Image (cartoon, grey):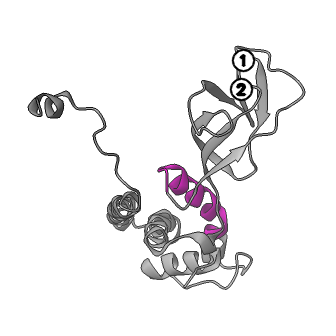
Amino acid sequence: MALTPIGLCSRALIKIGAASITGFTDGTAEAEVADALYGSTRDALLSANAWSFATVQATLARLAEAPLGDHGFAHALPVDFLRALSAGTPGRGRGIGYRIVGTTLQSDSDQVTLTYVSRPAEAAFPPFFDQALIARLAAEFCLPLTENTSRAEALARLAEAEFRRARLIDVQQDSQPGFEDFTLVEARGR
C-alpha cells in the first residue's frame, strides 16, 4: 500500500510514542514538527543514493543566455531535480563534462541528456524505501518531541541500518556488469 506524506510521518511518530497526525495543519506539536522536517528529510534521503525508482533521464532545455564562466551553454534543470548522476548527448546518458550552477547545468554541449535523482511522488516509493524514510523521520522527530537524546541516538543508528538495508535491496534490482576484458582469462585460453 502506497503511503502519503501524512501516513509516513504518522508511522514515524508512532515509532517514538507520539500521537499520529491527520494533517500538517492539525495544530499539534507533532504536526508542526512533521511539517517542518518532512520535506527536507525526504529529499536528503532521496539524494543520498542513486535509487532505481528515483533515477530518471531527461533532455534539458537550453537557455538563451550563455554562462559567464567555463562552459559555452547553460541548460535548465528539471523541477524535480535533486542530484546529478551523469550527463551526455542525446542517445547517451553520460560522457560530457558539466557543472551544476544554481538551477542550471553548464556544459560545452548544446544538447544534454541528464541522468539524475528526482523527487518522485510518495506513491512511487517502494516498501523498502518507506521503511528507511520512516526510520529517518522517527530519528529526526524524536529530539524535538521527546527531548530524549539517548533515544534519538538509538533511532539514528536504526535509521542508518534501515538505509543500508534499503540500498542493498535497491542495488539488487540492477543487472551487474560482467567482465568484458580480462587478460588473465584470455591468456588461459591460449
View extreme (right): residue: 64
Q: Residue 44 in magenta?
A: yes
Q: How many marks?
A: 2
Image quarter hosting the C terminus: top left
Decide if residue 187 is on the left or right side of residue 11: left
Q: Is residue 29 visible?
A: no
Compared to residue 39, the image places residue 44 above or below, namely above
Percent across and percent down for residue 188 are 9, 32
Asked which secondary structure carries label 2, the reply is: strand
Amino acid type for the residue under numbered disc 2:
Gln
Magenta residues, as a range? 33-51
Q: Dots 1 and 2: beta carbons under 8 Å?
A: yes
Decide if residue 137 is on the left or right side of residue 6: left
Identify the disc placed on residue 71. Answer: 1
Q: Gap between marks 1 and 2, in whole Å?
A: 6 Å
Q: Residues within 10 Å of mark 2 (few under 14, many from 20)?
A: many
Q: Residue 48 in magenta?
A: yes
The residue that disc 2 covers is: 106
Main SS of residues in magenta: helix
Q: Earlier in the sequence, mark 1 or mark 2?
A: 1
Amino acid type for the residue under numbered disc 1:
His
Residue 96 found in image quarter: top right
Image quarter hosting the N terminus: bottom right
Percent across and percent down for residue 158 are 33, 65
Q: Is residue 111 visible?
A: yes
Percent across and percent down for residue 102 are 73, 33
For the point 57% across and 85% down, the residue is: 20
Q: Residues within 10 Å of mark 1 (few under 14, many from 20)?
A: some
Compared to residue 95, the image places residue 59 above or below, namely below
For the point 48% across and 82% down, the residue is: 14
Asked which secondary structure carries label 1, the reply is: loop
